[in-house]
Image (spheres, rainbow, N blue to C red):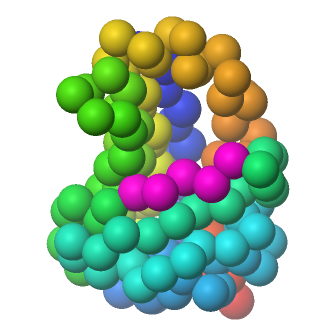
Amino acid sequence: MLHYDVARQIGAPPERVWAILTDAPGLAAGFGIIRVEGTIAHGQRIKVIPQVNPDWAFPVRVAVFQPARRMVWQGGMPLGLFKGVRTFTLDPAPHGSSFRMREECSGPLAGLIGRGIPDLTASFAVFADQLKRKAEA
């Protein structure tokens, strides 16, 4: 299974961080994302266009939406041939929030498709660092 993971301690309450995470137009400003099309809300379909590969748009569904706590974006191919799941988690911390973002790719074609996906480690760090900067501003 292919996965990427990032975590940050953020000096802002989970509600403030959540407001930034769910502001689709705002995620284009320094987050390593060109744009997010659609509304980030439970059950909605959105499309994420990343800077790391602008020719590859990721259509996903917001499968879990627990305000100021947890959100899951899911996408993939029919019959479970490939599945991508990105989970955002916020936990209260003594001086703000503990943030984690994890992406897991699975399914019979994950190895093949994974070879075509650029390494997302750096872009995950950019996302988390920008989220921290905006929330703490």
Residue displayed at 47% across by 81% down: 38
Residue 126 percent location from the top left of the image: 75, 55
Q: Residue furthest front?
A: 78
Residue displayed at 46% across by 49% down: 101
Give the residues drawn in magenta, as a range: 56-60
Pick the quarter of the image with the C terminus.
Answer: bottom right
* Image position of 116 with respect to 47: above or below: above
Taken as a whole, is the magenta stretch helix, strand or loop?
A: strand
Q: Number of marks in the image?
A: 0
Residue 43 lies left or right of residue 35; in this view the side is left
Residue 75 painted magenta: no
Residue 105 percent location from the top left of the image: 42, 27
Residue 41 lies left or right of residue 2; in this view the side is left
Toward the viewer: 119 or 67? Answer: 119
Q: Quadrant of residue 134?
A: bottom right
Residue 58 painted magenta: yes
Residue 40 lies left or right of residue 129; in this view the side is left
Toward the viewer: 71 or 77? Answer: 77
Pick the quarter of the image with the N terminus.
Answer: top left
Residue 91 percent location from the top left of the image: 30, 63
Residue 25 percent location from the top left of the image: 62, 87
Residue displayed at 76% across by 68% down: 34
Q: Quadrant of residue 92?
A: bottom left
Residue 113 in sight from this viewpoint: yes
* Image position of 70 with respect to 79: above or below: below
Toward the viewer: 14 or 64? Answer: 64
Residue 125 in sight from this viewpoint: no
Toward the viewer: 76 or 135? Answer: 76
* Image position of 42 with respect to 54: above or below: below
